[in-house]
Image (spheres, grey):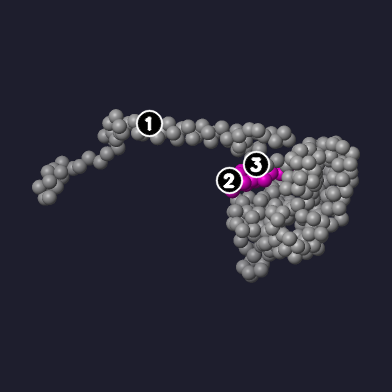
Amino acid sequence: MASHSTGDGGIPKRGVGKNGLKRVMSLGGAYGTRNYTIKDLRDCKGKRTLVETLPFSTEEAAAAEEAGIDTMKVRFDPNQPELAANIRQAAPNTFMAFSVPLVAAASEVEAVRLGYQAMSIGADAIMCQWSPKFISAAADAGIPIQGHAGLVPRKSTWTGGLRAVGKVLDEAVWIYNEIKTLEEAGAYAVEVEVIPEQLLSEISKRTTLITSSIGGGSGGDIQFLFADDILGNNAPPYPRHSKQYRNLFKMRQDMQLERVEGFKEFIAEVQNGKFPEKKHIIEAPSGLIEDFLAKI
């Protein structure tokens, strides 16, 4: 990857705009091209709904970029950064927010360090479940931060478990205040999970944050679904807010059955003397075997 920090040039050529791309330099000093910048995303707010996914493999990331997904989230493990780095390389032109583990930072300093680590391998932003103090520190350090509100699964013990949030007045007001607090802390966006559609719609009108809806209906600025759900990678049950556009789980089951049947047929043909056939073997030239036997 061309990088200003290592002095190896590689500034993207002019004219990429005709392909809908922007020339960028990452916070880590790497040159590249992206379909969106933070400014572009902010400019889209209230004008059109963007689409977002979270791929779990390089194949999914490449397919999502080719299909025209606007933005992606990518899970970032600081102990195995190559997993996120490979996804970054598989979809080099798509805006990506790396989702960092909640427990990987225990102080403002660690939050900034973790953010810089993710940005250095190609993240365009960080998605987190951090406290406003951590978000403020990272934002002050120049890291674009996306927060999380509504149902935050890792903190769901505070909201009654894995269930919809915001169906009563106190919860609705709490979600709004949480989002405004993230806004004041310097975040640029917030993922809002499993709240009433109408509530998210009203909140989106009252915050400068870009709202990414997962289970919040059409009330957000971005419609977000996991690649697992879009592609039907797993067996039922599925999250209520999700939709399966393909059934790759069944395809994998069918492929496994085909593997089993293939091995069974191979075993049977060997045992019955049907394999190998004449077309599968190498015939010895005339006289070779006689000469061989005489020699030994």
Residue nearer the viewer, 158 or 120 = 158
Helix, strand or loop for disc 3:
helix
Distance between mark 2 and mark 1 Cα atoms: 31 Å
The three-letter code of the residue at mark 1 reads: Glu
User: In the rendering, which numbered label is found on residue 227?
Assistant: 3
Mark 1, residue position: 265
Residue nearer the viewer, 227 or 22 = 227
Distance between mark 1 and mark 3 Cα atoms: 35 Å
Q: Position of residue 257 (x, y in %)?
A: 48, 32
Earlier in the chain: of badge 2 and badge 1, it is 2
The three-letter code of the residue at mark 3 reads: Ala
Question: Any magenta on residue 59?
Answer: yes
Q: Residue at x 66, y 54 (%)?
A: 76
Instruction: Please identify the quadrant where the N terminus is shown.
Output: bottom right
Q: Residues within 10 Å of mark 2 (few under 14, many from 20)?
A: few
Helix, strand or loop for disc 2:
helix
Q: Position of residue 169 (x, y in %)?
A: 89, 39
The image quadrant of residue 124 is: bottom right
Q: Residue at x 78, y 41 (%)?
A: 160
Mark 2, residue position: 59
Q: Is residue 115 visible?
A: no
